[in-house]
């Protein structure tokens, strides 16, 4: 019985046990038994489990060579076990190399499990390489998956941010946006680089919008004039740009920006008016602002939108209407 | 010149028998293939989930749950409560009260602390205006209640779309409850494929189940015979046709009780049609036409593990009203988009799905009635071999029952549900009754549906609602 074998060798895995493990873990039922046994062992004695896993890391490495040719279910499950139980080196071991190659698998589940495993067990450099590899356009990899999986990286997130930047130009547009979102959420990345992306016509519009959104939570003084210019645009084809820029200006509490946003309350675009109203309410928490000129002004649409956001804020402050 | 009547009858029976033979072979083959394909896909999916072949990351797309409600005071609060216990990161609930004359609105206001708010609504789809808007939060989930004058479910859904904030919406009936993982499951196709514009979930009769914290705590066949037979019918339909059509992007129906849509696409093709009672099928068909006509790469998917528990009619009277409405909706949709039939421009949807719905759904009551008439004619002319006919009928009933039971037990097994021995025996007995007796009643119902349908105004009718056991 595998579980008995594991418990017997938990303190010191012998070469015979490792050889037996190598043979057994080529089959799904044994892999499942291994997972369940390790769950129990870890809950009973975390230190013992940890020592055991370090001792059998080379078993995972030798199993990596057996993965090509296995079914997608088997391969994906192996990646899942690696993520959970591999305690080997974070650099170029056979496990890391295999996981990186699986990041290009035509099966979404294999890809995702492989990348999730890399996020747990590999270095920032290897994870960034995997993202670049799976951004090959062969199989759709949802950008949210990239962002969310990056957020689960077990190592230094700032280091991952740097490596993602190194491979940035190798990514497709959706992955670029996802990486920028990662930088935004982790407050990493270089503001000067974001500004360069946002202002460069060489980048896709969605990538540029993502770069503009970066400044909503990572304000930089150098970006302010650009955001003001974009928020002020009257080009109806650039309404999304105006929306994002209006949203970002909530992080720049100045009277000039408040006046700009008040003007945007009269925009022809419902979305721009909505973004402007939301930003004005957020600015009001950071500076003195008077809304009487809008609420009592001639523009019914402007006052309606602002009043709506004021009511939302009051509801939120009052407890939000929980049952 | 004498007319050999007997010869004419003989020729007529011979020709029509060939037709019916082809019809039965076609339908039986479709049923067999679809249930086989459906079962194998469900089992494969169960195996994949067992071995962690799934998206474990909390990867979500923001979704609006739109709940149109008309006189749903009995079920609306438990339905909203089930929506609040979903295991999903970001979603909002928009309830649209479509001119209820009972205390649906007051029930919601009493149960959830909502506050009247002056909300600017952008009318992206034409609809009746909102009368009042209330807003509140339950934890992190925003709840919006909108009231309007009665204008029908489609009009209510369109207003819900106008009110919604998020890029995807789900329409869900007010008498339905979702499981904890339903939202996660129905959104998975969006993560897997960027071209997905709509996803249908699995609808199962809620009669006889108990939900606790979004999980099925107790499952049994409904005690009443009518909803119990519908359980078998739903499983057969959802397991077979939907999964099979999903393999070639050919689903023409996403149940109005539980379907997810990409908002911008629905708006682009005009929203729900307010002139039909089959608004669910009409929207999906319209999406197919819109995307193909505009050369948009799209997918309409089916998520068999995204489960919605909905109330099935518990009396024959209510069931007849429902099926009559469904058949009228089917007729309206198929005549509206009749250019799809056999049209290669629409790919497999036009060549296979539409043809299937035309012959085996819309025209089947006529064909089956003709078959009965033929049997009578043949019997009166002494051309029928009675023992053979009886044997054939028994084999047909057995085949149909086996198909239904395969679908039913596949669903039980792959969802790790448990049913009692008595329910198992009941399912076996009811499968035979459903495929013979109920099917005949439904055939007559659908046959009569179109007779004078234009004259009827109250096409929705009233269906008795029962409280759903949710805690």
Image: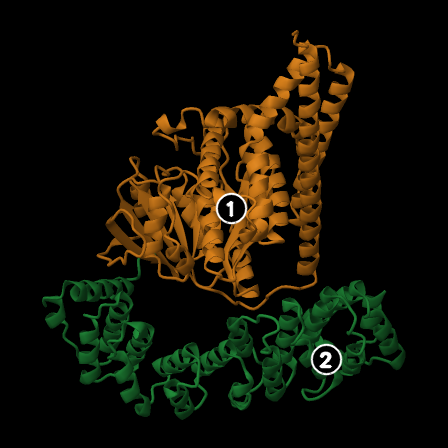
Chain colours: A green, B orange
Q: Residue A299: tell me if it is visible.
A: yes
From this view, report whether residue A44 is shown above or below residue B368.
Answer: below
Contact (CB < 8 A) between labels 1 and 2? no
Instruction: Read off the chain for label 1.
Output: B
**Where does residue A139 sit, x and y in percent of width and height?**
61, 71
Instruction: Read off the chain for label 2.
Output: A
Residue at 58%, 22% in the rendered image: B369
Element class at badge 2: helix
Left or right for B224, reference B61: right
Residue at 34%, 86% in the rendered image: A219
**Frontmost residue, B426 versus B379:** B379
Left or right for B210, reference A1: left
User: Label 1 belongs to which residue?
Assistant: B340
From this view, report whether residue B63 is shown above or below residue B328.
Answer: below
Count neighbours of disc 1 (C-alpha within 10 A) and say few if under 14, some if 14 to 19, many if 20 or more. Answer: many
**Frontmost residue, B127 versus B148:** B127
Looking at the rendered image, the disc whose residue lies closer to the viewer, 1 or 2, is 1
Quadrant for the N terminus of chain B, please: top right
- How many discs appear? 2
Q: Residue B216: tell me if it is visible.
A: no
User: Label 2 belongs to which residue?
Assistant: A98
Left or right for A87, reference A192: right
């Amino acid at each position: 019985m595998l579980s008995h074998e594991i418990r017997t060798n938990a303190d010191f895995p012998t070469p015979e046990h490792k050889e037996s493990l190598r043979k057994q873990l080529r089959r799904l039922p044994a892999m499942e038994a291994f997972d369940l046994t390790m769950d129990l062992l870890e809950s009973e004695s975390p230190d013992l489990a940890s020592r055991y896993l370090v001792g059998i890391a080379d078993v995972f490495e030798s199993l990596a060579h057996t993965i090509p040719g296995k079914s997608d279910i088997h391969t994906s499950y192996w990646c899942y076990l690696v993520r959970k139980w591999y305690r080997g080196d974070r650099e170029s071991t056979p496990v890391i190399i295999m996981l990186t190659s699986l990041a290009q698998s035509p099966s979404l589940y294999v890809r995702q499990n492989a990348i999730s495993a890399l996020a747990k067990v590999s270095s920032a450099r290897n994870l960034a390489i995997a993202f670049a590899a799976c951004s090959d356009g062969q199989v759709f990899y949802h950008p949210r998956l990239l962002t969310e999986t990056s957020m689960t990286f077990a190592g230094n997130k700032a280091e991952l941010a740097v490596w993602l930047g190194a491979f940035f130009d190798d990514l497709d547009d959706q992955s670029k946006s996802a990486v920028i979102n990662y930088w935004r959420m982790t407050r990493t990345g270089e503001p000067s680089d974001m500004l360069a992306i946002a202002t460069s016509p060489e980048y896709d519009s969605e990538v540029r919008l993502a770069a503009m959104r970066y400044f909503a939570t990572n304000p930089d003084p150098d970006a302010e004039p650009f955001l003001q210019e974009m928020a002020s645009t009257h080009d109806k084809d650039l309404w999304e740009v105006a929306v994002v820029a209006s949203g970002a200006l909530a992080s720049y509490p100045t009277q000039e920006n408040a006046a700009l946003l008040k003007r945007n309350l009269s925009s022809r675009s419902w979305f721009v008016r909505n973004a402007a109203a939301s930003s004005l309410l957020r600015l009001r928490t950071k500076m003195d602002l008077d809304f009487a000129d809008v609420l009592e002004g001639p523009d019914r649409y402007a006052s309606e939108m602002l009043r709506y956001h004021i009511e939302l804020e009051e509801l939120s402050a009052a407890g939000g209407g929980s049952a | 010149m004498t007319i050999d009547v007997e010869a004419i009858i003989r020729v007529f029976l011979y020709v029509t028998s060939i037709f019916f033979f082809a019809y039965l072979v076609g339908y039986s083959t479709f049923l067999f293939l679809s249930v086989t394909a459906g079962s194998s896909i469900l089992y494969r999916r169960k195996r994949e989930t067992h071995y962690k072949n799934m998206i474990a990351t909390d990867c979500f797309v923001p979704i609006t749950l739109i709940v149109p409600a008309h006189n749903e005071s009995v079920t609306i609060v438990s339905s909203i409560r089930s929506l609040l216990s979903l295991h999903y990161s970001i979603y909002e609930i928009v309830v649209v009260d479509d001119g209820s004359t009972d205390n649906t609105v007051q029930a919601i206001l009493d149960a959830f602390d909502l506050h009247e708010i002056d909300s600017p609504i952008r009318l992206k789809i034409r609809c009746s205006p909102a009368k009042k808007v209330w807003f509140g939060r339950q934890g992190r989930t925003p709840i919006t209640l909108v009231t309007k004058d009665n204008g029908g479910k489609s009009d209510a859904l369109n207003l819900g779309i106008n009110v919604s904030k998020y890029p995807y919406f789900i329409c869900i009936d007010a008498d339905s409850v979702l499981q904890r993982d339903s939202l996660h499951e129905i959104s998975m196709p969006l993560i897997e494929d960027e071209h997905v514009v709509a996803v249908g979930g699995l609808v199962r009769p809620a009669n006889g189940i108990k939900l606790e914290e979004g999980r099925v705590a107790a499952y049994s066949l409904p005690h009443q015979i009518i909803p119990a037979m519908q359980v078998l019918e739903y499983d057969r339909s959802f397991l077979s046709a939907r999964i099979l059509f999903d393999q070639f992007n050919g689903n023409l129906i996403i149940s109005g009780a539980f379907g997810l849509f990409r908002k911008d696409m629905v708006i682009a093709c005009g929203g729900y049609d307010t002139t039909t009672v089959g608004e669910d099928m009409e929207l999906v068909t319209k999406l197919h036409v819109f995307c193909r006509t505009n050369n948009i790469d799209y997918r309409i998917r089916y998520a068999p593990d995204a489960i919605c528990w909905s109330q099935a009619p518990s009396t024959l009277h209510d069931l007849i009203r429902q099926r009559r409405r469904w058949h009228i909706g089917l007729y309206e949709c198929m005549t509206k988009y009749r250019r799809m039939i056999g049209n290669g421009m629409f790919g497999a949807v036009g060549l296979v799905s539409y043809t299937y719905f035309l012959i085996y759904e819309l025209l089947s009551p006529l064909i089956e009635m003709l078959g009965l008439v033929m049997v009578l004619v043949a019997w009166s002319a002494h051309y029928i071999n009675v023992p053979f006919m009886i044997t054939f009928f028994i084999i047909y009933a057995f085949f149909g029952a086996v198909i239904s039971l395969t679908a039913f037990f596949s669903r039980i097994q792959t969802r790790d549900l448990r049913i009692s021995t008595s329910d198992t025996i009941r399912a076996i007995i009811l499968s035979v009754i459903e495929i013979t007796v109920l099917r005949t009643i439904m055939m007559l119902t659908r046959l009569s549906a179109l007779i004078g349908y234009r004259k009827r105004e109250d096409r929705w009718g009233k269906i008795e609602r029962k409280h759903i056991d949710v805690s």
